[in-house]
Structures are given as C-alpha cells and as structure tokens.
Image (tube, rainbow, N blue to C red):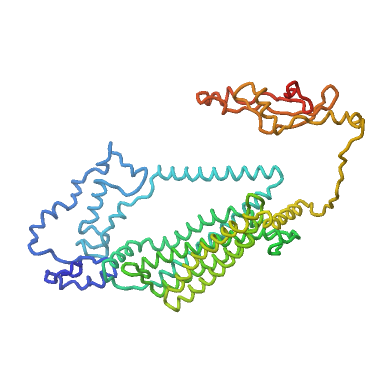
Amino acid sequence: MSTRPDDEPTDKPGDQEDPASSREDRVRGGFFQPDATRTPHHGQEDGASEPAARRSSPPDDDDELPQDAGFPFGFDPTVLFGGARSGAAGRGAAGRADRPGEASGDGGDGAGGSGTPRSRGREGRRGPGPLALTIMILAGLAVVLLFLSRTWTEVLWFSQLGFSRVVWTQWIAAGAMFIVGTLIMFLAVLAAMTRAYRAREITLPYDEASRNLESYRTAFEPMRKPLTFIVPALLGVFAAGLELVPHWREVMLALNSQSFGTTDPQFGLDVSFYVFILPVLTTVVSYLSRVVIFAGLASVVVHYLYGGISVARQPHFTKAARIHLSVFLALFALLRAADYWLSRYQALYSSNTKFDGASYTDVNAVIPANAILAAIAAVIAVLFIASVRARSWKLPVTGVVVMIASALLIGTGYPLVIQRFVVDPNAQREEAPYIQRNINATLTAYGLDGIETTNYNAATTAQAGQLKEDAESTTSIRLLDPNLVSATFKQLQQNKQYYSFASSLNVDRYNVEGQSRDTVIAVRELNLDGLDAGQRTWINEHTVYPHGYGMVTAYGNTVASGGYPSF
C-alpha cells in the first residue's frame, strides 16, 4: 500500500469536486501538497469545530491589548530599529486584516468586491528605524574616511617628492587588472550557470530522492535569479583581488619591457623573456585555471540541482551535462598543458645548495619530463572533447589515470633517480658546464664580461734592507680581524649583561696625534635578551633600558700585552 500523499483514498467527501488539485499540478508546484479545498473528515461537525474557531478568532477592537503590551517598560524597540511589529499589536493588526468584510475594495461580505484581504506581512512591514540608519551611516562614513585617509596621504607624500605619477600608475594598473579579472570570472561563471539552467530537463519525480530534490528546487527558486548574479560577482571580486591585483608590477614591466641583447644557452631566448614575460604568462595561466575550476563547479551544482547529474543509484548525466562537463575538463587539461610547458622555462630559475640556475638534473630530467607531461595533458583534452560524441567516459578517465601516474613517475621519480645515481657520484664533472653558465651569466649581468685577464707574476723574495724602507707601510698592516675579534670585545668591554656587540665589527681610520690610524670599531648595543624574565617589563624596556651605551674602539695595527686589543 503506497504512503505517498497523492495516493490517499478517494472516498472522502468533497474529493470529487477538486479539479484544481490534480497530482500533476501539485508535482509541478514543487511538493505533493494536500488539497486546500477538502472538507473536514467524517465525524467533524460544525458544532465540534466551533470552539476551536472561537478560540482562534481575533479579539474585537474593544478588547485589543495596547500596542506596547508585551515589551519591557512598555517600550517597543522596533520604533528605533524598524522591522515588523510583534506581540499583541501585530496580532491585533493581523486579526483586523483577516476579518471578513474588511478587505480593500467595495465588497463587504468577506469575499466579494474587487479587493482581497490585506497581506499580514505587508501590514506589519516597516523600514529601518532611526537608530539603525544612524549606525549604518556612521559605519559607512568610518570606512570611507579610513580609505581616504590612507589614499590621500599617499597622494600628498608622492606629490611632495615629485613622483605623483608613480602612485597613480600603480592604482590605475591595479584597478584595470581588478576590473578585467572580475569581468572574466563573472562572465565565465554566469555563462556556466545560465547554460546549465537552460539545459535542464523537466520531469516528474519518480522516487524519494527526486521528490526531495524537487523540494530543494522549490525552496531555492526564489533565490535563483539573485544568486545567479551574486555568486559570479563575489567570485570575481575575490579572485581578481587576491590573484591578479598583487601582480600589477609584473604586468607594467612586461608592457614596458626592453630586450637585454643576451640569450640564454638552453633555449636561445632573450633574457628579457624570463625577467618580464614569463611571470605574466604564469599568472595568466594560473588565473584562467581558477576561472575554469569555479565555472565548472558552478555548472555541476546547477546540473545536479536540476537533475542533469544524478548519483542516487548509479551516475547518470544528461547530454547537456556531459557536454558542459567535458568542455570544462578539456579546458582545464589544456591549461595544465600550458602550465607544464611554462615550467620548462621556470627550470632555469631553480636554485640548489651549490649554485643558482639550471643544473644537470634540471636540463636532462626536469625539462624533458615537463614536455612529456604537457603532451599528455593536451592528449587528455582531446579525449574529453571526443567523449562528447562517444558518450563514454572510459577514454578520458583512462587518460587522467595515465596523467597522474606520469606526474608521479616522470615528473617526480625520474629526476630523483638522475640526481641520486648520475649526479651525486660525480657532481664536479657533471655540474661543471652548468656552473660555468652561472659564472658567465653573473659576469654579463654586472657588465664584467668584456674584461681582459692577464697573469701577474708576484715576487716571492725580498732584498736586504727592503723592510726598513717599507717601515711606514708595514706599520699600518692590520693585526685585528673584525670578523673574529667580536668575542674578545664582548668579554672585555661588555660591562653589563644586557649589552652586546655585533658578530662582525667595523673598521675605520681616525687621526690620532696627527697620524691616520687604522681602527676596529664596535657599538655597545642594547640586548634585552640579557635581562631576566622578571625584568622584562614594559617600564624597564621603554624607560630604564631604552638604548645602548657608547662605542668601543681599538687600534687595528696594535695589540696590548697578551695579544689583547689596544682600546
């Protein structure tokens, strides 16, 4: 025996006179709604229902409670904050609106005339109160003032320095990128949601899961149109603000890039490509990948909500859902292929413990592996497009599995094997050509690649009496190493536990008794870590121990007895 609401017995009085509440109408309305025009069940006489009706009837006008009844001290907070009135006043107003004969219009019999009963929600609806409006206005003014105080300070600062163009260039570039990124995300997600909704299939619920989904659709329907625009707008604002705007500098550099006139030895591209163009391409591919992901997820949600995708018993996709999903997966696979391809050039940025730049493993393992992964990703994109006509997910799913396995084996495992068994046993021989590349690039970057080198034959023997002739020079030879003498300075000149010296001291020359003397200099700096935990109070840190104590100087070319510095 079925327990569905629309399968009730038909021997009830009045069921034969209900043409408007058919099963199909109630299904299309979103719920299996009970008939609103059914008469009471057997055994419910008019007299039996009279007491309940009498109890639920609104009070007469003479018996109504005061409007402020039910509120503390007789005060209604909706006067300040607005909103619908509650309590006895709201019930009294609703009761008067529901009485027969008080509908708007000329009729007085409760159903006649051209009017209808006043809406209870409309009767008690009220806008924000004066206090709520004041709070909102003050909050808005605070936000505007905080924003303007920062921006206007920046404008005044750069204008005073004569560089107002700098700050305006930054803001215009960031604003343009924000608008473009927001529009791209907004239009992509909006198109995905709209296409998925228009491609929905209207069917009658046939089981419990479909009936529940129909209920969700009915509840969601009033919010569908606003959310269709709100969700893409929010995604666009957050994605553009977090992903694109911070990279305004790279975009401006790319738009104003110049050729370096030097090519890299690996790909033969101008070095300006790696400095200006490659960072922008990486950012664009990353942002487009996020656009495709969010648009695809939005399309999947809409298709699932309207029955295009079903996973109740076994996965089921309508034709439109399969096409949309295949297109998004193909686009994502193409963007992954582009990302792998750009990773080949990014391998030249790699850094290791020995030197910066591409190493033997990068050139012989990482770059070829990324090229292979890019080709696999492109093939998977083609398989997703082909699955639209084949009506099967076997080929693209197989491709995805191959892609994951290749990323683990080729992208990660192969470079590790090369590094472990080829490079590490003989690193000096294998890395020598790539270390030389690093040296050449450094010389070129500092403009030292045109220097001519000559051999210098140093004299290793001295003639008799030569040191006497060079006595003025030899007396200036530094005996104290500023990189090693810091510990000695600390031991002899620290004075207090809360003072310290830098690990590497400075050198300078001072005129002492008419002679220029080499000196090693150190500032006795404050070190609060030398204080006990009980002394680390706000008063001590800001008033008692606010600074260091003087400077310590020692002759660089003279030592005292015992080899100590001569202060």
Q: Quadrant of the N terminus?
A: bottom left
User: Measuring 20% from the left and 65% from the top, which residue is drawn there?
Assistant: 36
Percent x, y for residue 35? 20, 67
| Up/down of 523 relative to 361, above or below | above
* Residue at 23% from the left image edge and 63% from the top image edge: 107
Q: Is residue 254 at all visible to an observer of this figure?
A: no
Residue at the bottom extreme, as displayed: 389
How far across and how far down the image is residue 314, in percent?
Answer: 33, 70
In terms of depth relative to the viewer, which is nearer, 99 or 298? Answer: 298
- Rendered position, 254 above or below 461: below
In the image, residue 325 above or below residue 495 = below
- Location of residue 37 (image quadrant): bottom left
Observer-nearest of 551 and 362: 362
Horizontal and vertical percent position of residue 502: 66, 31
Work out which quarter of the rendered image holds the C terminus and state it: top right
Task: Give residue 306's position: percent from left, percent from top.
Answer: 36, 68
Q: Picture quarter containing residue 373?
A: bottom right
Residue shown at the point (33%, 64%) measured from the top left: 217
**Tag count:** 0
Q: Nearer the viewer, residue 44 or 354?
A: 354
Residue at 41 percent of width and 66 percent of height: 300
Instruction: Report if residue 67 is visible in the image.
Output: yes
Residue 450 left/right relative to 410: right
Between residue 172 and residue 209, name the one nearer to us.
209
